[in-house]
């Protein structure tokens, strides 16, 4: 078993500008329906939550890339960030099987300017 880590940080303003400029096509390309519903419910801080999920997806890609035959075998909407009943984020994979993935853990945080995510994946090779 090998443990891989992925981390990403992004400026919230960058995601906000992309959403304001491109709008729904940008949102629909990156986020699942559940993620959109979650972020939009956050009203005035929704961009922090969109940015956090964007960073999370980047961190996931980094952590699991060694398990993929080809890095473009996974798309933005193949990984969904969902929260459990206590608000803790979890990763749900959709329409994709990650060979050898035995476990994955994620941590997300954000403040006024930045969102960051760290992912640890256990992959059996």
Image: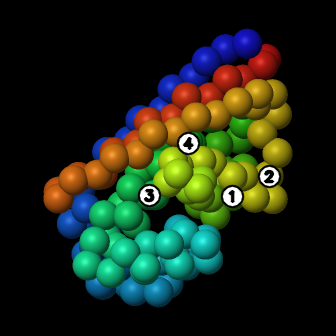
Residue found at x 78% / y 39%: 98
Of pointers 1 and 4, the one earlier in the residue sequence: 4
Mark 3 to mark 4: distance in Å? 10 Å
Asked if disc 2 and disc 4 are in contact, CB closer than 8 Å, the reply is: no
Q: Secondary structure at mark 3?
A: helix
Residue 12, x across and y down, in percent:
25, 62
Please say if the residues under marks 2 and 1 sit with CB atoms less than 8 Å apart: yes
Disc 2 designates what residue?
96
- Can you say whether 16 is above or below 72 in the image? below
**On the image, numbered disc 4 is attached to which residue?**
60
Left or right of 66? Residue 88 is left
Residue located 53% across and 51% down the image:
86
Which residue appears at 50% of the width and 72% of the height? 38
Earlier residue among tags 3 and 2: 3
Q: Which residue is mark 1?
A: 78
Quadrant for residue 124, please give it: top right
Q: Position of residue 11 (x, y in %)?
A: 23, 56
- Return the residue found at the far top: 1
The residue under label 3 is 54
- Residue 122, relative to residue 63: is it above or below? above
């Amino acid at each position: 078993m090998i443990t891989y880590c992925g981390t990403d940080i992004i400026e919230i303003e960058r995601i906000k500008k992309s959403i304001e400029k491109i709008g729904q096509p940008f949102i629909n390309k990156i986020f699942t329906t559940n993620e959109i519903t979650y972020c939009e419910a956050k009203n005035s801080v929704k961009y922090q939550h969109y940015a956090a999920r964007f960073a999370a997806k980047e961190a996931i890609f980094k952590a699991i890339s060694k398990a993929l035959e080809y890095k473009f075998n996974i798309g933005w909407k193949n990984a969904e960030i969902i929260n459990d009943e206590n608000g803790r984020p979890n990763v749900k994979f959709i329409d994709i099987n990650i060979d050898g993935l035995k476990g994955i853990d994620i941590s997300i945080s954000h403040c006024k300017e930045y969102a960051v995510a760290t992912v640890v994946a256990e992959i059996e090779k």
